[in-house]
Image (cartoon, grey):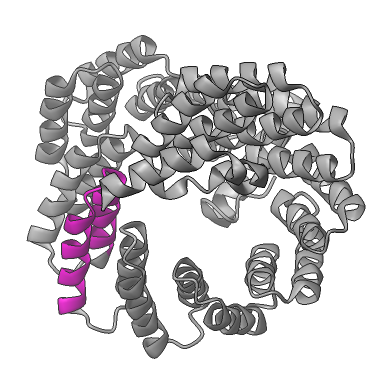
C-alpha cells in the first residue's frame, strides 16, 4: 500500500507495519498519533472496515483516547449512520468538552439530519474552542458545501475574506458557492474583488471566463481567457476554454487555431482532438475532421463522441454504410443517447433498412415520449412506406404531448391530404398558421405537389394578408 500521496512516508510506513502485524498475528507498538494516521489513511481510501478495525486496535491500547471515538464517529458519518455517530460524539464530549473537532463533527451530523439550528450552535462552539480560527472557518464552510448548503457555506467564506482579505482560496470558494446556486453576478463580483487585489492572478481571470461562459456571454469569456494567456501564454486550460467559447460564437476557424496550440503545448488528448475535429467538420473539411476524430478514438476508445463524429463525416458524404458502423459503435458506448440513436435511425432509413430504423424510433419514444424529432422522422418513414393510418395515429399521439407544436400540425396537413381527408387537413393547416405562420413551407418540404391545391394556397394567403 502506498500512502505517500496522502499523509506522507511516515504514515505509509506505519500502515505497512500495522498490516504486517495483522497478517502475522503479532503485537507491535504504535503510539496514539500513529494509529490515528493509520485510521485516516483507511478513511481516505474508503476502507471503512479496516479503519474501524484500526479504531478498535487503538482503543485496546488507549481506552480513554477521545480522538478514537471521534474517528469512529467520522466513519459512521461517512456510512450515513448518524445516530451511531452522535452516540460516539456524546461519549467523547464527556471526556473532552472543549474539543473543537468534536463539535465540528456534531454540527455535520445535525446538518445531515436536517437540524440546521443545532448545527449552527455546534459550529459556533467549534469556533469558540479552536486555536486556529481561519482553519476552522474553512472546515465549517466545507461541511456546508459538502451538504449542498452553498449559501450557508458562502457566509463563512465571506467571514474569512473579512478577516484575511488577501486569502485567494476564500475568493475561489465563495465564487464556487455562488456558481452552484446560479448567482453568477455575485460570483463575478467576488472574482473581480480578487483581481483588484491581484491583477495578475491567472486563476481569477480563468474563473471569471468560466462564469461568463455559463452566462452565455462568450465575448466577455474570451476577453477573460485572453487576460490569462497574456499573463501565462502556456496556460492551456484557458486556451482550451477560449476555443470552446469561439465555437459557441461559430468562429470555427479561430477555434481551430486555439485547439491546435493546446495540442502543441499539451501533446493532445482525446477531448482536444474531438473538439478540433468538430470544428473541421463544421467548416467542411471532412477528411481533417475524420482524421482528428480517429485520433481521439485511438487515445480513448470509450469516447462515444469520437466514434459518432467519424460517422457524421461519412453521413455528410452520403456514405451511409460506413456511417452506420461508427454510429453503432457510439450507441454501444452510450445506449441511451438520443442524438446517437436518432442519427443512426436516419442513416438506416437512407440505406433502406426501414425495419431497423423503426425499431430505433420506438426505442427513442420509450426514452422520451415527447421528442419532437422522433415523431417527425418516424412519421416520414411511415408516410414514405404507404402506412398513412399509422403515420396519422403517430402524429395524433404527438399532439397529445404538445398541441402547440406547429410542426405536428403541418405534418398532419400532408398526411391527411394523402388520406383524402381534406377538411381535417385544412383545420390543421389553420392551426399551424396561427401558431407559426413563417414555417408554412414545411407543408411543401416533403409534399411539393400540395402547392397545386387551391384550398391550401388560399388559406395560406388569407393568413398572410392578416399579418400584413
Give residue 268's position: percent from left, percent from top: 69, 74
Image height of 277 relative to 256, above or below: above
Image height of 82 relative to 124, above or below: above
- The answer to whether residue 53 of the structure is visible from this angle is yes
Name the quadrant of the N terminus: top right
Residue at (58% x, 55% y) in the render: 5
Looking at the picture, tell me which residue is in the foreground, 303 or 235.
303
Looking at the picture, tell me which residue is in the foreground, 122 or 273.
273
**Residue 193 left/right relative to 382:** left
**Residue 13 left/right relative to 166:** right
**Res 188 → quadrant:** bottom left
**Res 281 → quadrant:** bottom right
All told, the count of numbered labels is 0
Give residue 48's position: percent from left, percent from top: 56, 26
Residue at (26% x, 53% y) in the render: 468
Looking at the picture, tell me which residue is in the foreground, 306 or 132.
306
- The answer to whether residue 52 of the structure is visible from this angle is no
Q: Which secondary structure class fits the magenta region best?
A: helix
Looking at the picture, tell me which residue is in the foreground, 188 or 203.
188
Q: Which residues are magenta?
A: 169-196
| Residue 67 is covered by the magenta coloring | no
Give residue 317's position: percent from left, percent from top: 82, 64
Residue at (42% x, 85% y) in the render: 229
Image height of 364 relative to 141, above or below: above
Q: Residue furthest front?
A: 454
| Residue 192 is covered by the magenta coloring | yes
**Residue 203 left/right relative to 389:** left
Residue at (61% x, 30% y) in the render: 375
Give residue 202's position: percent from left, percent from top: 35, 78
Amino acid at each position: 500500500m502506498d500512502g505517500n500521496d496522502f499523509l506522507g512516508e511516515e504514515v505509509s510506513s506505519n500502515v505497512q507495519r500495522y498490516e504486517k502485524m495483522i497478517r502475522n498475528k503479532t503485537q507491535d507498538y504504535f503510539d496514539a498519533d500513529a494509529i490515528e494516521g493509520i485510521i485516516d489513511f483507511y478513511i481516505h481510501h474508503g476502507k471503512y472496515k479496516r479503519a474501524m478495525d484500526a479504531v478498535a486496535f487503538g482503543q485496546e491500547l488507549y481506552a480513554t483516547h477521545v480522538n478514537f471515538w471521534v474517528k469512529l464517529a467520522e466513519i459512521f458519518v461517512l456510512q450515513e449512520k448518524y445516530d451511531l455517530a452522535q452516540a460516539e460524539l456524546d461519549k467523547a464530549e464527556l471526556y473532552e468538552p472543549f474539543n473543537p473537532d468534536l463539535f465540528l463533527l456534531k454540527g455535520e451530523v445535525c446538518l445531515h439530519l436536517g437540524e440546521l439550528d443545532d448545527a449552527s450552535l455546534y459550529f459556533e462552539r467549534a469556533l469558540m474552542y479552536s486555536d486556529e480560527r481561519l482553519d476552522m472557518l474553512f472546515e465549517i464552510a466545507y461541511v456546508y458545501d459538502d451538504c449542498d448548503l452553498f449559501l450557508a457555506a458562502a457566509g463563512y467564506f465571506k467571514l474569512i475574506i473579512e478577516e484575511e482579505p488577501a486569502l485567494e482560496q476564500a475568493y475561489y470558494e465563495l465564487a464556487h458557492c455562488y456558481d452552484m446556486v446560479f448567482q453568477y453576478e455575485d460570483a463575478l463580483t467576488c472574482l473581480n474583488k480578487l483581481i483588484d487585489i491581484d491583477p495578475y492572478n491567472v486563476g481569477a481571470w480563468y474563473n471569471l471566463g468560466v462564469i461568463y461562459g455559463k452566462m452565455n456571454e462568450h465575448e466577455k469569456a474570451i476577453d477573460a481567457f485572453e487576460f490569462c494567456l497574456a499573463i501565462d501564454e502556456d496556460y492551456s486550460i484557458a486556451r482550451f476554454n477560449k476555443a470552446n467559447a469561439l465555437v459557441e460564437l461559430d468562429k470555427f476557424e479561430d477555434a481551430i487555431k486555439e485547439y491546435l496550440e493546446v495540442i502543441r503545448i499539451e501533446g493532445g488528448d482525446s477531448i482536444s482532438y474531438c473538439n478540433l475535429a468538430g470544428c473541421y467538420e463544421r467548416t467542411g473539411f471532412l477528411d481533417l475532421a475524420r482524421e482528428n476524430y480517429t485520433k481521439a478514438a485511438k487515445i480513448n476508445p470509450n469516447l462515444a463522441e469520437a466514434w459518432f463524429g467519424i460517422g457524421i463525416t461519412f453521413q455528410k458524404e452520403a456514405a451511409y454504410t460506413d456511417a452506420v458502423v461508427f454510429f453503432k459503435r457510439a450507441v454501444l458506448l452510450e445506449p441511451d443517447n438520443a442524438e446517437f440513436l436518432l442519427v443512426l435511425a436516419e442513416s438506416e432509413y437512407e440505406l433502406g433498412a426501414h425495419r431497423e430504423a423503426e425499431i430505433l424510433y420506438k426505442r427513442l419514444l420509450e426514452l422520451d415520449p415527447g421528442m419532437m424529432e422522433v415523431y417527425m422522422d418516424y412519421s416520414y418513414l411511415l408516410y414514405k412506406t404507404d402506412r398513412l393510418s399509422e403515420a396519422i395515429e403517430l402524429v395524433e399521439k404527438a399532439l397529445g404531448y404538445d398541441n402547440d407544436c406547429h410542426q405536428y400540425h403541418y405534418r398532419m396537413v400532408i398526411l391527411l391530404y394523402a388520406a383524402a381527408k381534406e377538411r381535417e387537413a385544412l383545420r390543421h393547416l389553420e392551426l399551424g398558421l396561427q401558431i407559426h405562420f413563417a414555417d408554412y413551407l414545411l407543408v411543401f418540404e416533403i409534399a411539393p405537389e400540395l402547392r397545386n391545391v387551391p384550398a391550401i394556397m388560399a388559406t395560406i394567403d388569407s393568413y398572410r394578408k392578416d399579418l400584413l
